[in-house]
Image (tube, grey):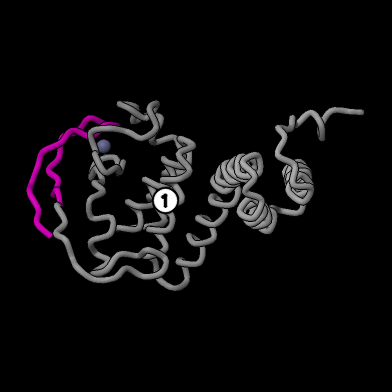
Amino acid sequence: MTFKERFYKCGVCGVENKYIVYTSDFISGYSDFDMKPVGSIIGLGASIMECPNCHYANYDIRTTIVSELSNNLKLWNSLSEFQNIIKKYSGTLRKILLVAKQYENNMDYLNAYKTYIMASWVSDDKKTNKFRKKAYQIFTEKILPNYNNNLIQIGDILRMEGNFKNAIKIINAVRELTDKSDHNILKVLDAEIKFIENKDKKRHNLGEIFSEK
Ligand SMILES: [Zn+2]
């Protein structure tokens, strides 16, 4: 890892400070099964800068992830979710959590999920579980439904193409992952399974299962 010193103005409080900018060197080797990269965990989060004045943190301290935080120290100081992280945590974990929370608030769930996983990597055994759970919660509630919708779409396309073998594989996999309380999705999946079983290549409309008859 190589580093340079740079002066940047904080995107929240406007105070200029010196930061160390890291450029990571390529380290060869395999990552863990949960994608934790090879090498020292000190490198993780090293490229996140934290303003020593207001404790705002971002990969680029000059910009904010949540646009209303831009040049808004008053708002930053009044947001208890960020202030609690600043009080409760320190070092790399704090920087990572401040970034994760911004992604989460900005509804950038994919980056929020990835950043909470990163938080689990740099945490001790007691805290790691908490951040894994948080990542899992974001994934199942905010990310998985989008993946599932895309998978249902491709399953339907495969069925209309007459590729029933692959269509049923995909639809069954989604059904397996779908929560039992998700009645609407289950209704769609069950209808799709029927179409596939009947070797039906026709186009179908959701009104067929959702409109009152
Ligand atoms: Zn600042």
Q: Main secondary structure of the magenta part?
A: strand
State which region is magenta.
Answer: 1-22
Q: Is residue 167 left or right of residue 98?
A: right
What residue would you read off at disc 1?
A: 85
User: Residue extending furthest right?
Assistant: 213
In the image, residue 68 above or below residue 6: above
Closest to the observer, 167 or 43 = 167
Mark 1 burial class by Cα count in 10 Å: few <14, some 14-19, many 20+:
some
* Percent position of residue 185, x then y: 72, 43
Residue at 18%, 33% (x, y): give it. Answer: 9
Closest to the observer, 191 or 201 = 201
Residue at 23%, 55% (x, y): give it. Answer: 46
**Quadrant holding the N terminus:** bottom left
Q: Secondary structure at mark 1?
A: helix
Residue at 22%, 30% (x, y): give it. Answer: 14
Residue 16: in magenta span: yes
* Percent position of residue 184, x then y: 76, 41
Specify whether tag 1 is near ligand 1 (CB below 8 Å): no
In the image, residue 150 above or below residue 117: above
Q: Is residue 153 left or right of residue 111?
A: right
**Quadrant holding the C terminus:** top right
Q: Amino acid at mark 1?
A: Ile
